[in-house]
């Protein structure tokens, strides 16, 4: 059996990468276009980046998006980890099917339906309980937590399903309490999955437009809303510069997290090997 790649596999890989990353390359290239017209190359220039960074509306929207994404991703990760743990460890309990369905429903629910449902819920809560008095940061964050925790739940349920239970059992046999076992043994081992879930929730929240439009209010506009409003009036070269910055930041974060998780996994494997050697 040969390990050489066939021409078909190579062609499929090339086509797949071009299909995924070709538009990004074009967008990044045109962010350095001196001409304001998107369809006409006017030479290399970086003038759109200072224009973008001096735009107060863009900076405010970017700050709002980062705050909403970071807060909602953090809460979604905590709730998604708990839900994933329950679904993976307790396979038979009353109401499990209903609980699983409610947790994962936002994955298959159209965003228009989710956004409208959350809007109606907040309006009814404001009428009956006096909160929220108006739509804004709090409603957007709660709406983002609602749908992003479903993605974290799927990631964590998959990770807990393949977790080696003997490690926890050994810690319990040695006298550790269940909470300490989870914090000292379980959580460090599943930490890469937790980080992956947080990054996934952060990216989804940062990218969301439809649900945000339904549940947002004055003064809390996000970056996707700003980009959508600008594109409707015509393609602005500063949008290319903004997209390039976002791509750079996201790529840097993904690469950095991959390197850190790879190092952590290698360190964990070395510790396991050292423990096995010491027991021989």
Image (cartoon, rainbow, N blue to C red):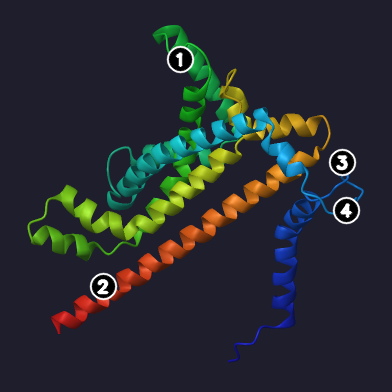
Q: Residue furthest left?
A: 175
Q: Considering only order in the chain, which callout, 4 or 2, is on the residue closer to the N terminus?
A: 4
Q: Considering only order in the chain, which callout, 4 or 1, is on the residue closer to the N terminus?
A: 4
Q: Which residue is mark 4?
A: 43
SS class, disc 2: helix
Alpha carbons under labels 3 and 4: distance apart: 11 Å
Q: Considering only order in the chain, which callout, 4 or 3, is on the residue closer to the N terminus?
A: 3
Q: Which residue is mark 2?
A: 271
Query: Could you tell me if the residues under marks 2 and 3 are in contact, i.e. CB atoms within 8 Å?
Result: no
In this picture, is 139 found above or below 83?
above
Alpha carbons under labels 3 and 1: distance apart: 43 Å
User: 240 or 280, which lies in front?
Assistant: 240
Alpha carbons under labels 2 and 1: distance apart: 50 Å
Query: Could you tell me if the residues under marks 3 and 1 are in contact, i.e. CB atoms within 8 Å?
Result: no
Q: Residue at x 9, y 61 (%)?
A: 173
Query: Could you tell me if the residues under marks 1 and 4 are in contact, i.e. CB atoms within 8 Å?
Result: no
Q: Which residue is mark 3?
A: 36
Q: Quadrant of residue 38?
A: top right
Q: In the visual, does 13 lie left or right of 108? A: right
Q: Residue at x 74, y 37 (%)?
A: 51
Q: Nearer the viewer, mark 2 or mark 1?
A: 2
Q: Considering only order in the chain, which callout, 1 or 3, is on the residue closer to the N terminus?
A: 3
SS class, disc 1: loop
In this picture, is 270 found above or below 105?
below
Q: Which residue is mark 1?
A: 132
Q: Residue at x 28, y 39 (%)?
A: 94
Alpha carbons under labels 2 and 3: distance apart: 57 Å
Task: Please state the horizontal and vertical placement of residue 8, each as a whole percent of the image.
Answer: 73, 78
């Amino acid at each position: 059996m040969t390990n050489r790649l066939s021409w078909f596999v190579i062609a499929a890989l090339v086509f797949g990468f071009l299909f995924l990353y070709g538009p990004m390359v074009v967008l990044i290239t045109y962010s350095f276009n001196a001409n304001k017209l998107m369809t006409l190359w006017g030479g290399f220039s970086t003038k759109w980046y200072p224009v973008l960074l001096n735009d107060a509306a863009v900076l405010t929207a970017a700050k709002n998006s980062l705050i909403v994404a970071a807060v909602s991703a953090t809460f979604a990760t905590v709730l998604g980890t708990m839900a994933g743990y329950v679904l993976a460890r307790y396979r038979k309990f009353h109401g499990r099917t209903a609980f699983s369905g409610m947790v994962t429903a936002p994955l298959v629910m159209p965003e228009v339906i989710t956004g409208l449902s959350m809007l109606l819920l907040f309006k009814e809560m404001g009428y009956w309980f006096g909160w929220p008095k108006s739509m804004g940061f709090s409603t957007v964050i709660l709406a983002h937590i609602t749908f992003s925790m479903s993605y974290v739940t799927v990631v964590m349920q998959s990770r807990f399903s393949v977790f080696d239970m003997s490690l926890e059992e050994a810690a319990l046999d040695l006298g550790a309490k269940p909470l300490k076992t989870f914090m000292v043994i379980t959580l460090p081992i599943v930490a890469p999955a937790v980080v992956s879930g947080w990054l996934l929730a952060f990216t989804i929240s940062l990218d969301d437009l439809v649900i945000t439009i339904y549940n947002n209010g004055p003064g809390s506009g996000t970056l996707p809303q700003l980009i959508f409003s600008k594109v409707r009036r015509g393609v602005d070269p500063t949008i290319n510069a903004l997209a390039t910055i976002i791509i750079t930041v996201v790529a840097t974060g993904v690469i950095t997290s991959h390197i850190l998780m790879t190092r952590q996994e290698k360190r964990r494997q070395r510790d396991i090997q050292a423990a096995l050697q010491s027991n021989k």
